[in-house]
Image (cartoon, rainbow, N blue to C red):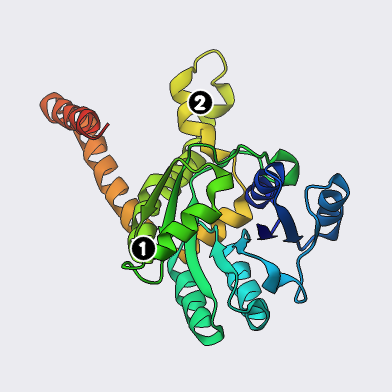
């Protein structure tokens, strides 16, 4: 097949390498010409993606920040034609799906929201790899939920990524869940590492510290845009967390051993139940 990839960062670069490794034709666009030239010279990208060849693609995956993704699709929509299936890879879905579903209806192409649950702490094309998505879950937000043929097409087009599991949901449900499973974790890690004690933790820390701080190392501009684009869902999770932490703090301050024990046991039981 012929695949267009927009954005040659960690995610886009990994998409490029996965399709290239299996012999597919890859066109790519990137804001930085230097990175695109490197991908072209390496042979992992066959040609620059542009208005003249975008309609040749079977699949186009847009791997930019949310607002940049919307703008790219809006600018290129008149050139897509009806052949390509266009998908994004953003961390939030409501804004991009609302805009791109409308553009798809207007210009006659198919748009599907997508979010592969793969990545690393590093960013950039040099850290991308062909097996980045092997076995990872992928969330799909289709324009209609009764289109079995579209779902089969999506799975077929994404086969070179070796996705482990597909979940189909709405943009609203995706953003609510991702606020809890991903965005809140990054905010907690970023806050936790700012303790003055972090500078002296050497020799006192083990796996717990590493687990708590792993995602504090992040792409700040990208995550900041994602957090703001999903502020209502993320703030709801922050409110819940702050409320729960306040209960622990109160029990500790009051030296209320039974209440603190109950709170801790409640958390332990919930983790055991949910896995």
Instruction: Confirm whether residue 194 shows in the render.
Output: no
Badge 2 marks a residue whose secondary structure is: helix
**Would residue 159 appear left or right of 29 to someone viewing this image?**
left
In the image, residue 54 lies at what x, y percent?
70, 71
In the image, residue 194 lies at what x, y percent?
53, 38
Looking at the image, residue 135 lies above or below residue 56: above
Q: Looking at the image, which residue sits at the far left?
A: 258
Cα separation between marks 1 and 2: 43 Å
Residue indicated by mark 1: 148
**In the rendered structure, which disc, 1 or 2, sits on the residue that comes first in sequence?**
1
Cβ atoms at labels 1 and 2 below 8 Å apart: no
In the image, residue 197 lies at what x, y percent?
51, 27
Residue indicated by mark 2: 210
Image quadrant holding the C terminus, namely: top left
Foreground residue among 70 and 4: 4
Q: Residue at x 36, y 67 (%)?
A: 147
Instruction: Confirm whether residue 129 shows in the render.
Output: yes
Residue 5: name its quadrant. Answer: bottom right
Q: Residue at x 48, y 66 (%)?
A: 112
């Amino acid at each position: 097949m012929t695949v267009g990839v927009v954005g040659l960062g960690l995610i886009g670069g990994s998409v490029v390498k996965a399709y290239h490794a299996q012999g597919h034709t890859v066109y790519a666009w990137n804001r930085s010409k230097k990175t695109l030239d490197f991908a072209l010279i390496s042979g992992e990208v066959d040609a620059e993606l542009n208005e003249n060849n975008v309609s040749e693609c079977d699949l186009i995956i847009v791997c930019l920040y949310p607002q940049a993704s919307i703008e790219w699709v809006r600018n290129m929509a008149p050139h897509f034609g009806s052949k390509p299936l266009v998908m994004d890879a953003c961390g939030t879905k409501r804004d991009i799906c609302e805009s791109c579903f409308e553009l798809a209806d207007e210009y006659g192409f198919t748009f599907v929201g997508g979010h592969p649950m793969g990545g690393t702490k590093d960013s950039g094309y040099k850290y991308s790899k062909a097996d980045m998505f092997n076995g990872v879950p992928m969330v799909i937000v289709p324009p209609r939920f009764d289109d079995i043929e579209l779902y089969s097409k999506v799975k077929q087009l994404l086969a070179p990524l070796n996705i482990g599991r597909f979940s189909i949901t709405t943009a609203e449900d995706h953003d609510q869940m991702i606020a809890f499973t991903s965005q809140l974790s990054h905010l907690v890690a970023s806050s936790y590492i700012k303790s003055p004690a972090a500078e002296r933790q050497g020799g006192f820390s083990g796996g717990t510290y590493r687990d708590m701080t792993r995602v504090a190392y992040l792409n700040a501009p990208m995550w900041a845009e994602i957090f703001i684009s999903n502020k209502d869902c993320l703030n709801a999770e922050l409110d819940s967390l702050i409320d729960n932490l306040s209960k622990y703090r109160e029990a500790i301050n009051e030296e209320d051993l039974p209440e603190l024990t109950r709170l801790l046991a409640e958390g332990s039981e919930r983790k055991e139940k949910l896995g």
